[in-house]
Image (cartoon, rainbow, N blue to C red):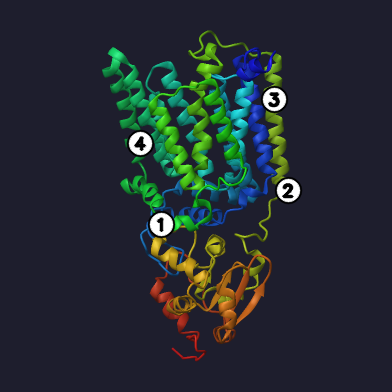
Amino acid sequence: MNSNAMWQGRGDAPLGQASELGALCFLATIVIVVVCFDSITFADGDTNWHIATGRWILAHRAVPTVDPFSFTVPGRRWVAHEWLSEVVLAAVQAAGGWSAVQLLVGACAGAAMALMARTLRRMLGVLSVIACVGLAFAILRVHLLARPHMLALPLLVLWTAQMVEARRAGRPPPLWLAPLMTLWANLHGSYVFGLVFTVPFAIEAWRLAGPARPRALLGWGLFLGLAGLAALINPNGVDDVLLPLQVMRLGVLQDIGEWKPTDLAHISPLVMALFLALFVCLYRGVRFGWERLSLLLLLLFMTFQHGRQEIILAAAGPLLLAQPLGAVLEPARAAPASGRASAWTFRSWAALGAAAALVVAIGAWRLGHPVRRVDSGTTPVAALAHVPPALRGAPVFNSYSFGGWLILNGVRPFVDGRADMYGDTFVRLALDTEAADPPAQALATLRRYGVVWSITTPGSGLIPLLDRTPGWRRLYEDRWAVVQVYQPALDARSGARAARPSMSGESGSGFAARTCAKCLKWSPSGSDESI
């Protein structure tokens, strides 16, 4: 077989459906293995407040509508649009610890990659499928976090795959897919993209239907209408649909790591995938309908604007490219396959059984070797452990990335990863305070909120500022976090432990008043005033 034939996938023996299922199970197993040995699963601080939210929902049997966690904006309107994912994460963590959460993330990633490979294989050869899935997984690797988007990832792949299959077969999407939008809408905000993706496919179907345009319009319109209604079945109604769009407009996103623009100055899986796709499409003369081309360009723009959108591009991009690529590389696969399904053979059953046994073994090993949360840039385990219990109930200033860990451990944070709830102005204030830019405003902010201790990353500009401020001293420091405390407040509280406010309910004003009654008010000049 020459190299051109290998690239086109010609000459590879067609897999029967039974053998193909076994191959897909092995692919999913490999992904699960990789995820279960990858420390990146818990690298994001938002994991912690998501699980804390799930615990709150399970305890109160209700979805929160106002902030139950912070001391700075308690009672502010909060659209908890990922509540179902948070409940699942919290329940899994309670049942099997952090190891079970990692297994869940691996299972979701494995299912998504297997679904992608199954759809691509219908239009592309084996080598092309391996290249597409491999690059997609490489891009997704840094996003394989214990967060709601991972629970929604299989649905994103399934939805896009069904759009592609519907157009390939010249029919509307199956109606059974529309109710899945309700599940997706309560798991993660990416469901909005699912609705958006449907529109270009519907336009393409109408444009190419010829005399059957009214029928195509009716079929796709009915499906889109049902999916839109299904998306409204959530605790927040229309607010849930509008929230992802509102988040995208937040100006402060440019200063939050996961939302920063994609860095194209360095070689990365994304850069490699883009150049490879561009090369193949130009070299082989791949042609797109304007609808899919517009959708791909939209995904590229979103990815360049916010690095987090790599997830959408990696999950949907290969599927959008598959049919145009297949028309050039695999003409024989351009039309839907017909014929009877192949029979299950001994090798098929053996492959499936081996994959299942390997999954069970991996799960048993992972659960038998519990994941332990250790110090990192988002989990200041040792630093928080050194904070006296009496001080934990007092107002704190924390780094943005530490907010989730504080919530999970019963400490009311100054700010956390729920930027959509805090809003542009407040998050900007928190980031400027952490950077001590300008110093006078940072000190004024701490005084305004009655802050008497802080826990920040070692690179925070606030640390040297408080070192120079009378009354403040370092209580603890390591490579991950620095704890500073206003000494008169610590002395005032050292005699007796103040009652810790419950996460469910004391109002912000009552908490602040009770806290200040037990400590001293500090000022930049160093003078102390009794309140």
> Label 1 amino acid?
Gly
Structural distance between the alpha carbons of marks 1 and 3: 51 Å
- For image coordinates 48% across by 35% down, the residue present is 156
Expressed as whole percent of the image width and height from the top left, the position of residue 144 reads 59, 44
Query: Is residue 434 visible to the viewer in this orientation of the structure?
Result: yes
Q: Residue 369, which numbered label?
A: 2
- In the rendered image, the quadrant that contains the N terminus is top right
Mark 4, mark 1: which one is toward the viewer?
1
> Which of pointers 1 and 3 lies earlier in the amino acid sequence?
1
Mark 2, mark 1: which one is toward the viewer?
1
Under circle 1, the secondary element is helix
Structural distance between the alpha carbons of marks 3 and 4: 37 Å
> Label 3 amino acid?
Gly
Up the image or down, 81 lies above or below 520; here it is above
Q: Are marks 3 and 2 in contact (CB under 8 Å)?
A: no
Up the image or down, 242 lies above or below 461; here it is above
Expressed as whole percent of the image width and height from the top left, the position of residue 391 reads 56, 77
| Foreground of the two, 461 or 522 | 461
> Label 2 amino acid?
His
| Tag 4 residue | 230
- In the rendered image, the quadrant that contains the C terminus is bottom left
Up the image or down, 484 lies above or below 6; here it is below
> Label 4 amino acid?
Ala
Q: Quadrant of residue 279?
A: top right
For label 2, count other residues whose C-alpha is less than 10 Å away and answer few (under 14), some (14-19) or many (20+): few
| Tag 1 residue | 251
| Tag 3 residue | 353
Structural distance between the alpha carbons of marks 4 and 2: 41 Å
Give the number of marks: 4
